Amino acid sequence: MKVTCAKPDAAVRELDVAIGLLFTDGDPLAVRTLAGAAYGIFADLAENHTPGSSWRAKVIKGSGLSEKDALRILNAAQNYLKHADRDAESALSFDEEENDDLIFIASIECGLIDHEMSFSMQAYQIWYLAMYPEQIGHNTAPVQMAMKAFPKLAEKERAEQLSLGHKFLEQVLGGYSGERDQSFRGS
């Protein structure tokens, strides 16, 4: 079977699989690879749409580093996982919870290009806001709503946090009669 899709659709599909793997406590390297690929596509598309608009561009600008050095740091784990020609004997070390941030940022980048966000991405954003309310602000309306969906999520053990995210995702997807490919604009 031949697979054909546009770049934003490919990124959505990669990110949806990364979210599913994360919530089922799948391999963090696979999560990072898929989320990193989706993030890269969305950031590139955001930059093509409006130069300087991507989260990546804003981080680079505010980092005080050269663009090359900032990109090297931002993409270190993803590059490690896809290249073996430079450092074949090296080892990778990263906190697997960095994947949480990367998936959230990728979903934000999707919104920047005004592409339809999947139900998985929207469910993930709710989970993320409840998990990390300090990132946006405890008193913001989106965080308050997320915290109602996931009371005291940040206080739970990691396995329970992920399990609750998975149950929520399944409810969201099940609520649309298995129409996994349905999505809507906005976040």
Image (spheres, helix red, strand yellow):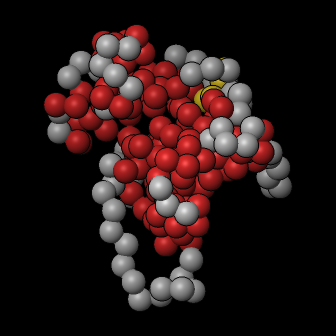
Closest to the observer: 125 or 30?
125
What percent of the width, then of the height, locates residue 107? 56, 36
State left or right for residue 30 relative to residue 49: left
Left or right relative to 162: residue 125 = right
> What is the tally of numbered marks visible in this picture?
0
Where is residue 137, by image quadrant? top left
Looking at the image, residue 88 lies above or below residue 52: below
* Position of 91 relative to 165 (above/below): below
Assign the C terminus to one quadrant of the image. Answer: top right
Question: In the image, what residue occupies the spot 77% across and 45% down?
Answer: 48
State whether residue 12 appears in this view. no
Can you give x and y, in whole percent of width and height, for residue 38 in the image?
61, 49
- Residue 29 visible? The answer is yes
- Does residue 168 sit above or below 27 in this rendering? above
User: For the N terminus, which image quadrant?
Assistant: bottom right
Q: Position of residue 141 (x, y in %)?
A: 40, 10
The residue most toward the front is: 64
Q: Kindly indicate the quadrant of the structure image that contains residue 132.
A: top left
* Closer to the camera in the image, 174 or 129: 129
Give the percent coordinates (x, y) of residue 34.
55, 54
158 is higher (above) or lower (below) than 153: below
Asked whether, in this view, residue 55 is left or right of residue 169, the answer is: right
In depth, the one of 63 and 9 nearer the eye is 63
Instruction: Identify the residue at horizontal 31%, vertical 26% (top origin).
Output: 133
The residue at the point 51 percent across, 40 percent down is 105
Q: Write the residue at 30% across / 57% down.
A: 95
70 vs 129, left or right, is right
